[in-house]
Amino acid sequence: MRLDLTKRSDYAIRAMLALTMAKEGLLSSRKIAEEMKIPPRFLPQIMGDLTRAGLVDAHPGRAGGYRLAQPASSVTLLTVIEAVEGDPHRQICVMRGTACGQNGECGVHDVFYAAESAILEKLRGATLQGIVDAYDAKQAVGAAAR
């Protein structure tokens, strides 16, 4: 079983992590794309979604760029994914390929619903700041071991 993010969500999370690590000031679209290996042609759409969702402040102009609109400690991965994807709940039954419940729930509905709920809860509990802090701590341990 594969649990993959869409490219849109992947790029949005990477962009938000770049802004989190920037700490202060504005980060240009070009800099975000370079640092996070995001194709530059996709970034404006993603940043537009994140701005409309109130997660990013956009400052146009030659010296402009982006910065977080909220503290990184209050922005979760689920919030970022919802900003670019919408409702993360499964719409199609894994067994039938149509909406579950049209002719009663399928046999695995409860199991997959519980699994989906667990994943969403994990994403809801993971903040941008927590991810950056955990990454920094791993890097420090790795550097100390060398």
Image (tube, rainbow, N blue to C red):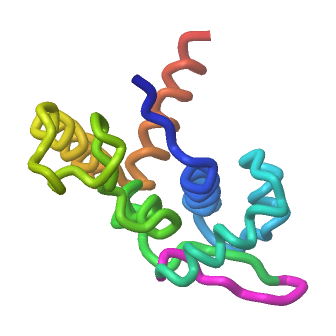
Q: Which residues are magenta?
A: 54-63
At x 56%, y 48%, the residue is 6
Is residue 61 shown in magenta? yes
Q: Percent x, y for residue 106?
A: 15, 39
Q: Percent x, y for residue 125?
A: 26, 51
Q: Is residue 64 left or right of residue 106?
A: right
At x 32%, y 55%, the residue is 91
Q: Percent x, y for residue 77?
A: 41, 54
Is residue 114 shown in magenta? no
Magenta-colored segment: predominant secondary structure: loop
Q: Name the quadrant of the C terminus.
A: top right
| Name of the residue lying farthest toward the top | 146
Q: Nearer the viewer, residue 98 or 56?
A: 98
**Residue 21 visible at all:** no
Q: Is residue 5 left or right of residue 124?
A: right
Is residue 76 positioned above or below 130 on the image? Answer: below
Q: Quadrant of residue 52?
A: bottom right
Q: Percent x, y for residue 47?
A: 65, 72
Q: Nearer the viewer, residue 139 or 106?
A: 106
At x 72%, y 48%, the residue is 36
